[in-house]
Amino acid sequence: MGKRFLLPALLLPVLLAACSAASPAAVPMTPLQSAQTVSEESAAEPFLYENTELGFTFEVPARWDWDNYKIVVSHGEQAEDGTEYSQVAFCFQSDSESPLLTIYRVSSSWWRQSGGKGASFLGERGEETFCYALPMAAVYNGEEKTALYASMMLTPAEVESGFTLMDENDVSYVEGVVTEAAMHSLVLETGSGQTLSFVFDESCASGLTDGLLLGDTLRIGYRGELDGADTRHVTVVSMETLSRRAKDSSGALRTGSEEEPVPIEAEEAS
């Protein structure tokens, strides 16, 4: 795998904010998307962390006790070119300023132009590059806490062997008719009559034709497992309009001609 580099904070104010003591105001990050504490059952053996949104897995070492770390996922934009990035920080005892490991998904264009700025290469899928950062030393005062942190520190070989990109074939698809729609959610009725509710990001909507209309037929690509009609554990990765709502002979939509498409755009920052 790739070579490990030093991580000078001044050279990486946006991408490596979680690895420095910089003010949170310096990082244009969206609100926290998820914070997960690993279950007690994973303490006795390696825990396979699976991120279906970003499309990778990471095998957490068995020596990491479940109550000594937390996994935090967040998103932001690169200062240089405005491209989006995501980061998964494995935080030591909930300390976001001292992660034991941070895995990033960045645009391949940013990676090529910036040279990674100190991060180490993990893999590439399409126009996405995955990289990581490790701390250089235990940073705590106090012998016991420093010793615990040091015992949990990873080597580059451990990170690179534990990381796996999900194949594009891991994406599943479902088709149906839109029965409800809002800015970032919709309800789909499948051909079998099953009703599925999905939450999505605007980045997944490039395959839609001029927004959403009730009655449109869509194909939705997702990662994760559907549990009957329960969609809480799936992540939408693509949306495609298969057909628009039917019109009558006059050209009006059969269920009403006044309805406008639901726009797919980012919400205004509060």
Image: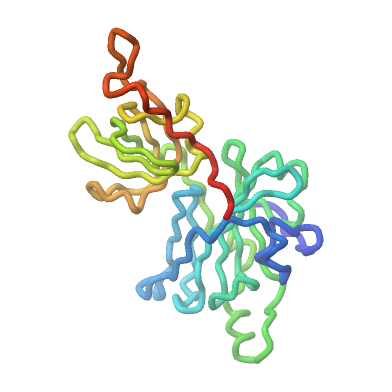
Residue 94, position in %: x, y? 54, 75
Residue closest to the far top: 249
Residue closest to the far front: 258
Q: Specify whether 3 is left or right of 230.
A: right
Image: 4 above or below 202: below
The residue sitting at 61% across, 54% down in the picture is 104
Q: Quadrant of residue 98?
A: bottom right
The residue sitting at 71% across, 45% down in the picture is 111
Residue 238, position in %: x, y? 45, 36
Residue closest to the far bottom: 143
The residue sitting at 58% across, 36% down in the picture is 126
Residue 222, position in %: x, y? 39, 41
Image: 148 above or below 178: below
Looking at this view, is 17 or 48 the one in front? 17
Residue 29, position in %: x, y? 62, 57
Looking at this view, is 255 or 188 the one in front? 255
Asked whether residue 160 appears in the rendered view, the answer is no
Q: Specify whether 270 is left or right of 134.
A: left
